[in-house]
Image: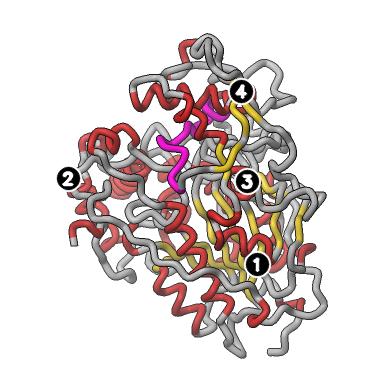
């Protein structure tokens, strides 16, 4: 097939990482002298105040600065809806929420009466509260200052090289000012069925019943597939949309090995969605989990950013070197790299208001879904995108749904949210393609994961692992009509591993069973 821009979106691939804001990873990407229109951190004198009542002798403000480690912020920041409200508005309402676990926080969940003007100056305050809740003491200056650290391009060479070599969006927002499950749900359903936080455990698999773009594609004979890592055992997308996608578990899910094989052979579907490994060994770029436990055992963080850089390089090269004459190849495949949410890391651009999706009848924590979440790093890779492009227009996660509906004429919008989102076809601007030999080369890297890290089968589950296990067990109970679920708080890695392998064999028979934690091999 002759290279033609009308085929630029024949095959769309999305690689969605975890929990980083735009400023945190790409704020230093361009200086004003390089790209005057780039909304980064250089030359802006950005900072956040330190609470005077807790630190009367503090310097007053923590400025944005260059990260001095690949594993910060550590411990993981607050990412749930009440924490994000504090980060946006500098508010803790009522005061009893200040050092409380999210499940113990009360209305109005730190939301001020006027939400029209987020100050973006509550990140340090919220991180201090989160640190004290997890570690059991107030952080020192060096520790709370982590939340204002941002990475330079030289520290994340794969991500920054791709961003400079193709198109970077500096106003791409996630759809919900909260955490993973709601934002990943909006990406494919333009709704989360009124759910905001991952907790209480086990609710998304049974309560998130919003129709998805996957079903719309299936009914219109548009091919799709979800690829994830062997070591994660079960797909996150499958679990948070289990009520809708269960009929496709055995047919539309594959591993990363399948992805690389499909790309090489020109057999990628029209739409591919890639999940990084969100358990050990992490390739998701997520800030470090289990700060208190690791400190007690003197264990290091898990190289999540470096693992993500390696995954990005592998996916990028698979597309760059795909050369099928009749199937998917470098000229007709569009790669979008993005993150599900900001994860509590600093960003300076206030999220805009937005149309609620409507139709759920449920608004968890009284949130009306009328505000977007924060900016996340998002990059478009295509032979038909002008190198060095900075896209300033507002985009959001539901822009992908809009793009797929427009590209394959899939009917009406799923909700009011994707109806008002901007599609991606306008950034396809070149009349001739950039051939693979002119695509930027990414650095070769090999990430080593030590066997002593947290995936030992004898150690407790991380927060996200508990959440994924709960979704799987609750959905299994629904299918069995039992309604009884084992308490995931008391389950260790070894038992969790057994539960998940059993469900994988039952639900995903096409995927070869492999070990959950490499440290046991």
Badge 1 marks a residue whose secondary structure is strand
Between circles 4 and 2, the one closer to the viewer is 4
Above or below residue 504? Residue 354 is above
- Residue at the (41%, 33%) spot, across then down: 199
Camera sees residue 214: no
Query: Which comes before the other along the chain, label 1 or label 3?
Result: 3
Give the magenta-colored segment's residue range: 70-85
Q: What residue would you read off at disc 2?
A: 458
Q: Within 10 Å of the Cα at label 1, are there few (<14), some (14-19), or many (20+) other Cα atoms? A: many
Badge 2 marks a residue whose secondary structure is loop
Q: What residue would you read off at disc 1?
A: 381
Give the quarter of the figure containing the C terminus: bottom left
Q: Position of residue 234 (x, y in %)?
A: 35, 56
Query: Which comes before the other along the chain, label 1 or label 4?
Result: 4
Q: CA distance from mark 1 to mark 2?
A: 41 Å
Q: Position of residue 167 (x, y in %)?
A: 71, 61
Q: Within 10 Å of the Cα at label 2, are there few (<14), some (14-19), or many (20+) other Cα atoms? A: few
Between circles 3 and 4, the one closer to the viewer is 4
- Residue at the (76%, 77%) spot, across then down: 5
Q: Is the Cβ of the residue at disc 1 closer than 8 Å to that at disc 2? A: no
Nearer-the-camera pick, 500 or 141: 141
Q: What residue would you read off at disc 3?
A: 22
Query: Which comes before the other along the chain, label 4 or label 2?
Result: 4
Between circles 1 and 3, the one closer to the viewer is 3
Q: CA distance from mark 3 to mark 2?
A: 36 Å
């Amino acid at each position: 097939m002759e290279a033609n821009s009308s085929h630029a979106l024949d095959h769309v691939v999305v690689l969605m990482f975890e929990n980083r804001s735009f400023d945190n990873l790409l704020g230093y990407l361009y200086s004003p002298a390089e790209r005057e229109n780039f909304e980064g951190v250089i030359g802006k004198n950005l900072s956040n105040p330190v609470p005077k009542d807790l630190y009367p002798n503090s310097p007053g403000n923590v400025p944005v600065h260059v990260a001095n480690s690949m594993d910060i912020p550590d411990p993981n920041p607050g990412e749930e809806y009440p924490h994000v409200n504090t980060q946006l508005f500098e508010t803790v309402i009522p005061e009893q929420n200040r050092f409380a676990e999210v499940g113990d926080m009360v209305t109005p969940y730190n939301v001020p009466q006027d939400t029209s003007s987020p100050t973006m100056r509550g990140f340090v305050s919220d991180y201090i509260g989160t640190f004290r809740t997890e570690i059991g003491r107030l952080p020192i200056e060096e520790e709370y200052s982590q939340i204002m650290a941002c990475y330079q391009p030289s520290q994340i060479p794969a991500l920054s090289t791709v961003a400079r070599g193709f198109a970077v969006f500096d106003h791409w927002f996630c759809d919900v000012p909260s955490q993973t499950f709601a934002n990943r749900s909006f990406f494919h359903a333009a709704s989360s069925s009124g759910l905001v936080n991952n907790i209480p455990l086990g609710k998304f698999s049974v309560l998130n019943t919003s129709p998805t773009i996957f079903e719309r594609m299936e009914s219109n004979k548009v091919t799709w597939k979800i690829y994830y890592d062997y070591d994660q055992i079960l797909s996150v997308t499958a679990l948070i949309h289990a009520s809708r996608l269960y009929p496709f578990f055995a047919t539309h899910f594959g591993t990363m090995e399948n992805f690389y094989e499909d790309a090489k052979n020109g057999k990628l579907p029209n739409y591919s969605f890639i999940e990084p490994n969100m358990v050990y060994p992490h390739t998701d770029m997520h800030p470090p989990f289990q700060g208190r436990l690791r400190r007690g055992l003197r264990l290091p963080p898990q190289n999540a950013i470096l693992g993500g850089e390696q995954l990005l390089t592998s996916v990028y090269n698979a597309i760059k070197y795909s050369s099928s004459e009749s199937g998917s190849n470098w000229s007709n495949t569009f790669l979008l790299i993005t993150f599900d949410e900001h994860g509590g890391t600093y960003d300076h651009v206030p999220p805009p208001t937005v149309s609620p999706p409507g139709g759920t009848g449920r608004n968890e924590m009284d949130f009306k879904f009328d505000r977007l979440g924060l900016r996340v790093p998002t990059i478009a890779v295509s032979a038909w995108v002008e190198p060095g492009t900075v896209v300033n227009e507002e985009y959001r996660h539901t822009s992908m749904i809009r793009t797929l509906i427009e590209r394959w004429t899939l009917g009406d919008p799923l909700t009011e949210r994707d109806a008002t989102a901007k599609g991606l076809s306008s950034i396809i601007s070149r009349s001739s393609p950039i051939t693979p030999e002119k695509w930027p080369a990414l650095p070769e890297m090999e990430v080593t994961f030590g066997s002593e890290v947290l995936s030992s089968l004898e150690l407790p589950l991380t927060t996200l692992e508990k959440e994924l296990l709960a979704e799987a067990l609750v959905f299994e109970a629904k299918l069995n009509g039992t309604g009884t679920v084992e308490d995931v708080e008391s389950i260790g890695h070894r038992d969790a591993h057994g539960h998940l392998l059993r469900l994988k064999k039952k639900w995903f028979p096409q995927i070869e069973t492999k070990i959950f934690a490499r440290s046991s091999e």
